[in-house]
Amino acid sequence: MRFRMRGLELGTLIIWSCFLLLLQPCGSMEPSCPADTRRSALQTPNSTSTQLNYNSAFMSPFVNSFLGSVQSNPFPKDLLIEMITGPSLEADLVKKVLKYETGFLVCVAIGILYIILMPLIGLFFACCRCCGNCGGRMYQKQTSNSHCKRRSFYWSTFFLTSLILAGNVCMFLSCTHTSKTLMRSPKEVSNILEDVKSYLATVPKQIRQVVDESSLSVDKVKSNLKGSLLGEFIKSGLKGHLDPAIKSISEIAQVINSTGVALQHVNNTLEQLIPKVDELHVNISDVRQRINVTLLLPGCVNCNSFQPKLDKLSMDGDLEFLDQSDLMSAVNKAENADVIGQANEGKDFFDSIPQKVKNETTQSVKMALVELERLKSQISSMTNGLHLDVLENISQPLNEVQNAVADVTQYTQLSSKISLAVGLGLSCLILLVVVCHFLGLLLGAVGLKPLDDPSERSCTSNCGGIFFMVGVGFSFLLSWIFMLVVLILFIVGGNAYTFACAPWQSKEIFQILSTPGLISGFNLSSTLKLNTDLTIGSVYSDCKMNKPLWTTLHLNSIINLEDMLNISKYEKQIYQSFENAHINIANITILTSDVKSQLRNFSDSASSTNFSSITQKITNISETNLNSSADDLDDLASKQTITNISDELHKEAQKLRNIQKAITFTIMPLVDELNSTINNLSRTASQINDTVENVLRNVVYAQEIMDYNISQIVKKESRTFVDCQFKIFLSFTQWANQTITEQLGRCGPAAAAIDRSENLVCGHLVASLNAFWFSLGWCMMFLIPSIIFSVKLAKFYRRMEGTEVFENEVMMNKFPRASLNPQSIGS
């Protein structure tokens, strides 16, 4: 019989399947615990540090070694403290200072003697030469070792002049470096102050950033508590137990739908196939009757032999299937059991859980919010003990100093130009003496002919000797001025290095500054308003290692960070408030007994349906072949002697072939389609029993969870939710503890500012200043022997008025010419 049933539309299938998928757990939609919150890095102070790209301390090893020899005593820490803290300069204190400065005083005494004696000696020397003494008489006694003396004086003068030139080059370099340092000092000082100000401004920002992070964490937890996140946790916990039931319901729904669709397809195929099969049956019957009439005609040769084949001529099989009304009825009842409606009730139940939980936990949330506000206010109060206004008070004088530096910048630049002009002027005067000596050495050596008579020496040689005497004259005239400059700069630069730079570089100065009462009214701890024992030396040492303020200022003694960030004291109250909350979630019935009964009926009907007999009938139809009968009929027609009988048999054979074509091209596609549908339906029916049993088993388990264990699930998920919130706090407290104790206010920029100041003052300004007076003093030291050798050497190059010569080993006196004045001064 034909099946008549209501098929499900494809759109209904898609909507229903997607609806059930919404109830299935989705990992991306389950509430997660965001304990590891990414936090932005602490702000860092801006740095405008620059490096002076020249080496002003190129002579520091020599200068410092000399100053170490002059002042061999260790740094007078106690004496300096006594000088600063003493009421006045007492006689005993003055004696101590003079005793410590003995080396400098000796050098000053030597310098004063140099300043006094050099012009006096020069004056006496000039007067003696005017009187014809001290080499003033233009007469040279010739001896056998004169040439050896001349060479010795020549190379001695050359060596001394080279040493003076080396010192002169160092003078040029050091005065240039001094000028550059003075020129760039205002900008460098301003940059140093700007870095310190940036650091002081960054520290409050970093503290506020930590406090703001605590507020963000508290606000995040408050948002979670006020929202429906707890309900999402509970919803997720229930989904984990109901997933198997939901999935199995989805599977059986798909089976019911696929079975209904398959039966509908079978029905539609039969509606097309049965009329065509009935028509073919009629056509075959008509052909068989006409063949039978032809076979009975007289004269038909051997026609009786075809009669058995004619009796079998028909289409095998029929389409009268077994009665499938039970399966059709079971499918209809299963579809009408309103599984979708019950799924809607389940969805509404799940969707309502967050709001129900939110309503049930209103009081608990209020209590938890109170505790969170207490925690937030306690963390915010951390800055109360730090007195951040002190940093602003420190920044104010730095601004004043920076403004003062800007005001004196033009004067500093003017001083730089003046110092450069004075330094280059002094260097050029020394260079003038060096040039005179080198010209004397050059011209004297080029113009001298050793075998010539001293009174007949060339003009070139004579000019060389004159240049020597000019250099000597300049030396006597200027050396005392040079020594005066050396003395003044030595007193200033030498003591600056000894009393300031040396202890600054060795960090002894911080020990002095840390002396209690050294600076009246100054106490670092009081200035920073901290109840800790701080010294400038210890603070600098910590800042040199870029330690945080927590370590440098010993803030652990005034702030109990562990207690402030301890959230365990709030844990008990918050847990208790949620455990005492009575969260009442209404129960639901996943599948009613009627739906379960319909599913069992559907399973039984599918199992009892015999799809093999249907398949066999379809196979019989597929095996129908009329072409073999047509071939036999053509063979019989060829044996006939009567033309009419032969033609009639050929005609009927052709009709059989036409019927077979109709079967092949019209009937068989529908038969194959019907066969495929029946096979799919058979496979589906073979799995229905297991699928239904799985559904009922999972539903029973899920229903037991809903009836007996839902309260335990609610408590478990509530604790998981609270644990999640505490993980957020724990993550913050770990970050805050590490940030405050290891990163907050790293004071490396402060130590760097001090080091840069030391490098500017000592490494460049004092070093270049000391290099200048040391180079000038170097020249003055070698100027004295240079004068002596230059005067001696000049006698060998200048043209003499009288001389003594050796002839055949007998000394002959050559009288001077009458026209020459023996008392003339050759200088």
Image (cartoon, helix red, strand yellow):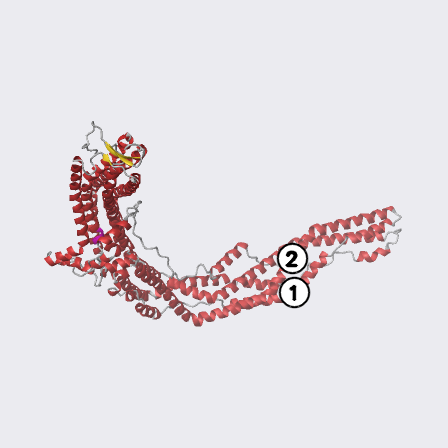
**Which amino acid, by three-letter code, is at mark 1?**
Asn
Q: Amino acid at mark 2?
A: Ser
Secondary structure under badge 1?
A: loop
Q: Nearer the viewer, residue 595 or 89?
A: 89
* Of labels 1 and 2, the one closer to you: 2
Magenta-colored stretch includes residue 498: yes
Looking at the image, which is closer to me, 169 or 311? 169
Q: Position of residue 584 (x, y in %)?
A: 38, 68
**Furthest residue in direction bottom, as rendered:** 708
Residue that carries the numbered disc 2 in the rendered image: 676
Instruction: Report the magenta residues as a range.
Output: 496-500
Front residue (pair 322, 51):
51
- The image shows residue 28 at horizontal and vertical percentages of 45, 59
For residue 781, what is the image quadrant? top left
Where does the image place residue 446, in percent across and percent down from the top left? Answer: 32, 33
Q: Quadrant of the N terminus?
A: bottom right
